[in-house]
Image (spheres, helix red, strand yellow):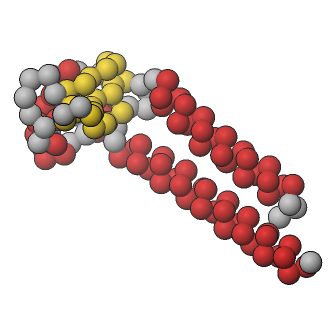
Amino acid sequence: TPTLCVNRHKAMRILLLLLLSVVLVTIQAQNDMLCSTYNKNGAAPVTDKKSCETACCTGEGICGGGKEDFKGTNGAAKCGCKSGSSTRDLCLDTSYVSTAAMLSTSWGFALACIAAVTLRALHV
């Protein structure tokens, strides 16, 4: 029926807008977590294992030897803080490439493609 089609089109538009919003929020969150610009509570940007340890303690309050989880190099770093059995991601430079980062980006792109194909199939 015509009313059902109109409601389906509106629903798909809303779905697409929500998906785009999630992608944009994710991108902004990643930009806010750059190691090269980290400065929470006066901690210096994360460039190596020592600065990752300082960021964990000064910036996050997670102190003690071996609490940092640093990977990469200056400008292409990833830093996390170990708390108990879990690790809290502190920062990630865009130049740092890991399988997890590539996978999450791939999933976001795949979802955007699915939404676009669905909208095209419905002629919205």
Q: Quadrant of residue 85?
A: top left
- The residue that appears at 64% across and 41% down in the rendered structure is 109
Give the side of residue 6 with respect to residue 22, left or right.
right
- The residue that appears at 25% across and 25% down in the rendered structure is 69
Residue 21 seen in the current view:
yes
Give the side of residue 96 with respect to residue 18, left or right.
left
Quadrant the N terminus occupies: bottom right
Relative depth, front residue between 92 and 103: 103
Quadrant the C terminus occupies: bottom right
- The residue that appears at 87% across and 55% down in the rendered structure is 121
Q: Position of residue 35 (x, y in %)?
A: 30, 34
Residue 44 seen in the current view:
no
Q: Residue furthest right?
A: 1
Q: Position of residue 99 (x, y in %)?
A: 49, 24
Q: How many marks?
A: 0
Give the side of residue 67 with respect to residue 25, left or right.
left
- The residue that appears at 67% across and 60% down in the rendered structure is 16
Q: Residue furthest front?
A: 85
Above or below, 13 relative to 90: below
Relative depth, front residue between 107 and 72: 107
Q: Residue furthest bottom?
A: 3
Q: Position of residue 34 (x, y in %)?
A: 34, 38
Above or below, 44 relative to 16: above
Above or below, 15 relative to 101: below
Q: Quadrant of residue 43?
A: top left
Q: Quadrant of residue 21?
A: bottom right
